[in-house]
């Protein structure tokens, strides 16, 4: 166990019932920058970001009650002032109804969370651009046999304005027979050629009122 503890790339920590550090492994100290001497004077809540303190306190209370808390994220404060996001889980060693120590295992997900945040911003901006453009967009998933339709298709087809995922056959059934070969060829050519391409052209689809 000692070899695993010392050489693990995951961050391992043991904390007593009052929040004092009992033991942390080298990976924990390397990432957060604290020394063994520092830890003698620090409490768990000294290194947890203030905005996450209430969350961590709630998790500890659940552990004391004997509950499982599952995987969670927590932002920790490094000695040099950096903030890192850790993902992990914690268990409690309880004796005679009282928690002796909690043991946690974490990994650094700071970069992953940053990328996820950037992607969320990009998606939001793309969504705003699509809605603002008033263009009816579709995205073909050949393997699944489905096509995503943006909400502006509702205005064209005379149906409810909302994003929808429908079988490919449902969309091709709406296309005028004269336009169907060209659309089918272009869509599947884009799929077979790899990177998405742009297909410009005029296609005819009937509105609901026209089909009634």
Image: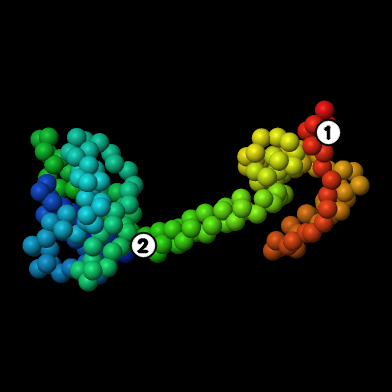
Q: Nearer the N terminus, badge 1 or badge 2?
A: 2
Percent x, y of residue 24:
19, 61
Q: Quadrant of the N terminus?
A: bottom left
Percent x, y of residue 76:
25, 59
Residue 9 image-quadrant placement = bottom left
Left of 27 or right of it: where is 167? right
Q: Is residue 62 above or below residue 116?
A: above
Reading the image, the residue beneath label 2 is: 110
Residue 46 image-quadrant placement = bottom left
Task: Kindly identify which numbered label has been placed on residue 210.
Answer: 1
Percent x, y of residue 63:
21, 40
Give the color scheme: rainbow, by chain, secondary structure or one colour. rainbow
Q: Is residue 121 above or below residue 161?
A: below
Instruction: Identify the secondary structure beneath mark 1.
Output: helix
- Looking at the rendered structure, the number of numbered marks drawn on it comes to 2
Outermost residue, right direction?
A: 178
Instruction: Look at the image and tell me whether residue 21 can be seen.
Output: no
Mark 2 Cα-neighbour bin, 10 Å: few <14, some 14–19, many ≥20? some
Task: Report the mark closest to the observer, 1 or 2.
Answer: 1
Left of 201 or right of it: where is 152? left
Left of 75 or right of it: where is 15? left
Q: Quadrant of the C terminus?
A: top right
In front: 112, or 68? 112
């Amino acid at each position: 166990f000692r070899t695993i503890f010392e050489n693990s790339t995951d961050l391992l920590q043991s904390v007593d019932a009052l929040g004092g550090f009992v033991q942390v492994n080298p990976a924990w100290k390397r990432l957060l920058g604290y020394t063994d001497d520092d830890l003698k004077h620090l409490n768990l809540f000294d290194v947890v970001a203030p905005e996450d303190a209430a969350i961590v306190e709630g998790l500890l209370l659940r552990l004391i009650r004997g509950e499982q808390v599952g995987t969670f994220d927590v932002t920790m404060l490094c000695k040099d002032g950096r903030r890192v996001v850790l993902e992990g889980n914690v268990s409690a060693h309880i004796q005679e109804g009282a928690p002796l120590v909690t043991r946690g295992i974490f990994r650094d997900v700071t970069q992953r969370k940053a990328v996820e945040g950037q992607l969320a911003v990009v998606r939001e901006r793309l969504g705003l651009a699509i809605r603002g453009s008033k263009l009816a967009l579709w995205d073909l998933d050949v393997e699944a046999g489905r096509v995503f339709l943006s909400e502006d298709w509702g205005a064209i087809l005379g149906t409810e304005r909302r994003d929808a995922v429908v079988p490919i056959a449902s969309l091709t059934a709406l296309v005028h027979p004269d336009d169907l070969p060209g659309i089918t060829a272009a869509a599947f050519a884009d799929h077979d050629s790899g990177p998405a391409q742009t297909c410009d052209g005029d296609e005819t689809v009937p509105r609901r009122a026209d089909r009634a």
